Image (cartoon, rainbow, N blue to C red):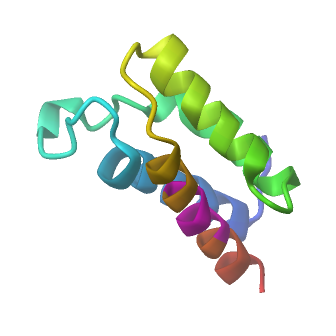
């Protein structure tokens, strides 16, 4: 896939936000777990690129944490993470 420099940077930011901020498993401070959420980055990227309000991104994060990972829901935290991701997207696309 041939991505723009902005898209490559957005992918990197998504990876960092998922690991250090979203982190439903609580592994942000474990160096060996740096790739824990890496497989979710492409889908978050696609949803983030196509959203206006972030609702679909928040729903995906909720599904990941509850269905895929099996931890409890945290809608407020997911919403804040999505706001951060949208901020990064908008900053990089300027």
Residue 44: in sight, yes or no? no
Locate residue 31, reporting x and y percent: 14, 40
Residue 32: in sight, yes or no? yes
**Magenta region includes residue 37:** no
Q: Is residue 4 above or below residue 27?
A: below
Locate residue 90, reporting x and y percent: 72, 77
Quarter of the picture holding the N terminus: top right
Name which residue lies at 57% across and 54% down. 79
Name which residue lies at 50% across and 56% down. 81
Relative to 10, is 38 on the left or the right?
left
**Magenta region includes residue 82:** yes
Q: Provide the residue span drawn in magenta.
A: 81-86
Instruction: Pick whichever, 68 or 17, lies toward us.
Output: 68
Relative to 55, is 85 on the left or the right?
left
Q: Quadrant location of residue 62?
A: top right
Q: Is residue 44 above or below residue 10?
A: above
Instruction: Pick whichever, 37 or 77, lies toward us.
Output: 77
Relative to 44, is 12 on the left or the right?
left
Name which residue lies at 35% across and 45% down. 19
Locate residue 53, reporting x and y percent: 80, 61
Locate residue 5, reporting x and y percent: 69, 68
Q: Quadrant location of residue 6?
A: bottom right
Quarter of the picture holding the C terminus: bottom right
């Amino acid at each position: 896939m041939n991505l723009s420099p902005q898209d490559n940077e957005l992918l990197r930011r998504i990876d960092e936000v998922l690991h250090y901020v979203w982190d439903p498993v609580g592994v942000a401070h474990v160096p060996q777990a740096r790739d824990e959420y890496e497989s979710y980055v492409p889908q978050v990227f696609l949803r983030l690129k196509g959203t206006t309000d972030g609702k679909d991104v928040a729903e995906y994060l909720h599904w990941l944490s509850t269905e895929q990972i099996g931890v409890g829901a945290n809608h407020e935290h997911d919403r804040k993470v999505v706001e951060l991701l949208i901020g990064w997207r908008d900053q990089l696309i300027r």
